[in-house]
Image (cartoon, rainbow, N blue to C red):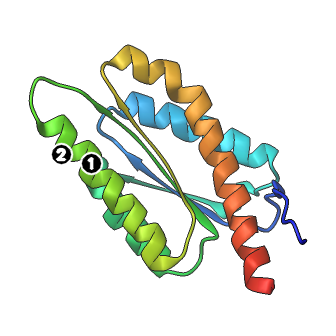
Amino acid sequence: MKTITPNLNGKDLTIGIVQARFSNEIGSAMVEVARQKLLSLGVADENITLVTVAGALEVPLALQNLAARDEFDALLAFGAVIRGETYHFELVANESGAGVTRVGLDFNIPIANAILTTENDEQAHVRIQEKASEAAVVAVEMANLLRELAED
């Protein structure tokens, strides 16, 4: 039995990041945590591209355009959707999540979706470090997995 083990070597990978500016403090902090983790995994700083968009609903379109360029091994999505008093929270959370997933499947590119969906700002702040770092690891691991699968 052949087993493909996780490969967290980011050397030679090119990573695109899309950050929603709504709740900018959270998204910007997530980008910096992910950037540091990517660098620690061997991704060169010049191989990381950051694009910002207004909010979570715009993230999938930006991801789609980055994926269409065929320059990236993996993409990351950052932002925060924080529950308010209306149904808008569910709409934004569900539609942005579905859009991110669709882009990944349509373009066969790994996308680490780290758009936080929380009840309040405090919950979002608590999750910045862990979720952003996890997203960076997932992006590198999945990019390497798809490369390995393509070679088989």
The answer to whether mark 2 and mark 1 are in CB contact below 8 A is: yes
Q: Amino acid at mark 1?
A: Asn
Q: Residue furthest front?
A: 1
Q: Residue at x 69, y 66 (%)?
A: 143
Q: Nearer the viewer, residue 36 or 106?
A: 106
Can residue 55 be seen here? The reply is no
Quadrant containing the C terminus is bottom right
Q: Is residue 34 left or right of residue 52?
A: right
Quadrant containing the N terminus is bottom right
Q: Is residue 31 left or right of residue 22?
A: right
Give SS at disc 1: helix
Real-space CA distance between mark 2 and mark 1, rounded to the nearest whole angstrom? 5 Å
Q: Position of residue 145 (x, y in %)?
A: 74, 67
Q: Residues within 10 Å of mark 1 (few under 14, many from 20)?
A: few
Give SS at disc 2: helix
Q: Residue at x 76, y 57 (%)?
A: 44
Marker disc for residue 91: 2
Q: Quadrant of residue 147?
A: bottom right
Q: Residue at x 37, y 64 (%)?
A: 62
Q: Residue at x 41, y 28 (%)?
A: 25
Q: Quadrant of residue 119?
A: top left
Q: Residue furthest right?
A: 1
Marker disc for residue 94: 1
Q: Is residue 82 left or right of residue 64?
A: left
Marker disc for residue 42: none
Q: Position of residue 81 (x, y in %)?
A: 30, 35
- The relative height of residue 129 versus residue 56 in the rendered view (above or below) is above
Q: Amino acid at mark 2?
A: Leu
Q: Is residue 133 left or right of residue 64?
A: right
Q: Nearer the viewer, residue 36 or 115?
A: 115
Q: Position of residue 142 (x, y in %)?
A: 68, 61
Can residue 86 be seen here? The reply is yes
